[in-house]
Amino acid sequence: MEYWLRRSGRAICYGTQALVNGGDALTIDARSGKTIVNGLHQYYRGSCERAGLFNEDWHVDDALSTLFQRRWSDAATSALAGVLEPYLERGKLLVREVADQPQIDAGLQAVFKDQAIQQQLRCILGEEKYRTLAQTFAELRRPGLALHQRAKLLTSDALSGQIEDMHRCEPFLLVLQDTFDLLRASANERVGAVADRIMPCLSQMRQRAIAFTGLAGKITKPGPARRMRDLQQLAALLALPRHANERSTLVEFIEALVRYHRDCLENRGRDPLIALESELVTVHGDEEHYPENKLARLAASEPAWDNDYYLTAASTIYRQLHGEPV
């Protein structure tokens, strides 16, 4: 559907990066499909649940469901099932083949031309406070400002708590990313040697972990929040160390991070990029070539953020859905 929306010149989608890079040749196979679905699931779940389009059990709002049933035909459903079934067998799908099906195209045209449905979908942006925040962030997307600098300038009286949560979250996510990348640069090294190299950064890592653990009380939903609870456990290893020896703390954290990575990749049907074998780091795939940059960011009091995709994509979607220039 995202491919169809982009090809039809409609509002931009969360999967823009894949759509732009793939173009009309965009192909999804069994491996990439799971990664794409996991990513889009996270984006849409948060946006749609907040907007009340469905609840945490994935039951669609009754009013919206009625509108869709009025426009989406059984013929479109049959056509969709017919084109997806071979994909499930051969494990590869040219996305254009789906969008080119006349019944599917007609069904989507009917859905997205319906004014009542359009009005319902505009509420995906939530209340005015979310739209205003998105507009503010879009205005901050100008040259010369790094993401963490934009984030410092992002203010909202109505959403100050959520913005504070973001500032607690993002720096710790960098701890995970940079530690992981350092492991990718440490093939055939012992875990203890990696910990020794990271040791000078531990103070800043711990500060970020302590800030992140402040979000623990806000994780309440049993299913969607599982990953967040896993990250809280990783943060606790640094924030509330169980070892008097700091090196042992770092070794335990690194081992837990590798297990977390393994579990995430297995859940997506993919092989882990890093493993530990008899305390040796095993790297599968490309190795990290600039570990000094990762160490510098781990030690920084104000690290440069990486995770700008959601804020950038969301601010664009918010404005396009309301017919505003991007």
Image (cartoon, rainbow, N blue to C red):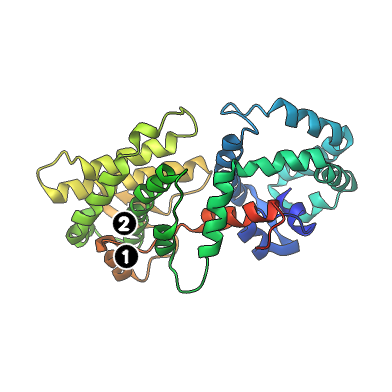
- Residue drawn where x is 22% and y is 50% of the image: 206
Question: Which residue appears farthest toward the front when viewing the image?
Answer: 157
Please report whichever mark, 1 or 2, sits nearer to the chain's N-terminal start. 2
Q: Position of residue 121 (x, y in %)?
A: 71, 41
Element type at mark 2: helix
CA distance separating discs 1 and 2: 8 Å
Question: In front: 260, or 6?
Answer: 6
Going by the numbered disc 1, the residue's amino acid type is: Lys
Instruction: Kindly indicate the quadrant of the structure image that contains residue 182.
Output: bottom left
Q: In this picture, is 254 found above or below 78?
A: below
- Residue drawn where x is 52% and y is 70% of the image: 142
Quarter of the image for the C terminus: give it: bottom right
Labelled disc at residue 294 = 1
Q: Which residue is mark 2?
A: 179
- Residue drawn where x is 45% and y is 74% of the image: 144
Question: In front: 188, or 165?
Answer: 165
- Residue drawn where x is 55% and y is 40% of the image: 46
Look at the image and tell me whether residue 86 can be seen. Answer: yes
Q: Position of residue 232 (x, y in %)?
A: 33, 39
Q: Position of residue 27 (x, y in %)?
A: 69, 56
- Kindly indicate whether the residue at mark 2 contacts the one at mark 1 (C-beta within 8 angstroms): yes
Left or right of residue 94, residue 237 in this image:
left
Element type at mark 1: helix
Near mark 2 (Cα within 10 A), the count class, few <14, some 14-19 or many ≥20, is many
Going by the numbered disc 2, the residue's amino acid type is: Thr
Left or right of residue 2, residue 211 in this image:
left
Q: In this picture, is 205 found above or below 71?
A: below
Near mark 1 (Cα within 10 A), the count class, few <14, some 14-19 or many ≥20, is many
Instruction: Kindly indicate the quadrant of the structure image that contains residue 196.
Output: bottom left
